[in-house]
Amino acid sequence: MSSTGTKKKLSFPTAYTVLFIVLILAAALTHVVPAGKYSTLLFDESVQAFVVTTPDGETQELEATQSTLDQLGVQVDVEKFTDGSIYKPVAIPNTYQELESNPQGIMELIKAPIEGVYETIDIMIFVLIIGGIIGILNNSGAFDAGFASLSRLTKGKEYLLIIIVTFLIALGGTTFGLAEETIALYPILVPVFMVAGYDAIVCIAALYMGSSIGTMFSTVNPFSSVIASNAAGISFMNGIAFRGAGLVIATIITIAYIIKYAEKVKKDPSKSLIFSQKADLEKRFLHENKEVPEFTVKRKLMLSIFALSFAIMIWGVSTQGWWFLEMTSLFFVVGIIICFLSGLGEKRAVSEFVTGASELVGVGLTIGVARAVNIIMDNGLISDSILNGATNVVGGMNGGIFALIMLVVFLVLGFFIPSSSGLAVLSMPIMAPLADTVGIPREVIVSAYQYGQGLMAFITPTGLILVTLSMVDVTYDKWLKFIMPLMGIIAVFAAIMLYLQAFI
């Protein structure tokens, strides 16, 4: 064997491999953690009655009155159910029951990613439609012309990009839970940040952390603050001042952290955590050898329509109850309009749309595999068992210590149950009454839930981060190296805010 051969450099596994490792670990837990479930309560509008489902699957209709809720120990105003504020099954306190174990084996592991794809098909189609539109905008020259114009406007003040993007996304996060919708922005904004002299991690941080901080310190977000407060039996206005103050301070901390890293990279590109990918990313996102097209009225109109569609999407989600079907339909129409305006011709426009969509197929598959982890845990009947174990840990503690332990509890639960509304309706009816026993307000539990799950969202593979990283081919280890110091700072800040809220 030749001694001149070079060793193959080890690289961090792809998002798919990381998710499959987590999937295997989740399946292993179903062999160790006892199976069990809580009884659940749901208001059935068709019969105007509560439907209670027991752990063994039996159902019973009960009168939809406040008296019924009081008897069940669900300390929530009945109107929260009847007006649709609480629209998911709520766990009933003190009804946890161990069930026969249902460990997930090889066949379940194989089927879970396929089921995950089926369950997230709405998100995947949304991603593909966005990819198609981006393909047309790229090949029409609209993006190149627009990026060049934006680069000239921010010349010498590139840090404004970080401030504006992070602030706006955080605002969307705190008001209506802006998260999955940001997937559409990465192919658009990564080139803008790279032209400004930053690396792709700066763009990821501005978008992903803006969303994460906004949802972590949600104020009026219906999918976390409102539904969690309703399930806890309090108004979402309780504690809003603390969460609002936390939002402002945490956003400033996050922006300062991103700018510090960004300016370091701008001064010396070799300081970038993804410097080894610089050439590949520039080849993918930038077109240095192509002449910058003129920013014509038609190209401005195309980009304006695309930007307007995001404003319409925000309006629809926040006020009209839109979700992925409506959002995807919106962008489908926008795609048709942009096809006509592009001047590429019918055949080429369709070809570029399909090519653009195909580039995001990998992202869509990542979304499906991430959902598979939750499927394994739900089918293995261990999600409720983990919650029940958490309630046994925190019972009867000192108020301040209890609040901090709750932060840790929700940090752990946030890994296993990444859905904000899902965790809220499952945990709040169980956890909120515990606050009464230690003499602290229930809104402290709502804040602990938001802070804990929000912190875990920074890094959890079962959330959106691996989907985000796959958009720009950044590996998970590079993200962890970037985010862990900030996560530590925000964790300490959240703990201080929670402790203060418990006693003020």
Image (tube, rainbow, N blue to C red):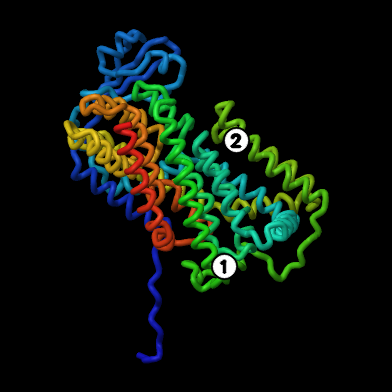
The answer to which of marks 2 and 1 sits earlier in the sequence is 1
Q: Residues within 10 Å of mark 2 (few under 14, many from 20)?
A: some
Q: Which mark is residue 314?
A: 2
For badge 1, the amino acid type reads Lys
What is the quadrant of residue 225 in the picture?
top left
Q: Residues within 10 Å of mark 1 (few under 14, many from 20)?
A: some
Res 461 seen here: no
Q: Residue at x 51, y 70 (%)?
A: 275
- Quarter of the image that includes the N terminus: bottom left
Judging by the rendered image, the residue that carries numbered circle 1 is 266
Q: Secondary structure at mark 2?
A: helix
* C-alpha span from label 2 to label 1: 33 Å
Left or right, 7 with respect to 195, comes to left
For badge 2, the amino acid type reads Ile
From this view, report whether residue 437 is shown above or below residue 375. above
Q: Residue at x 64, y 58 (%)?
A: 192
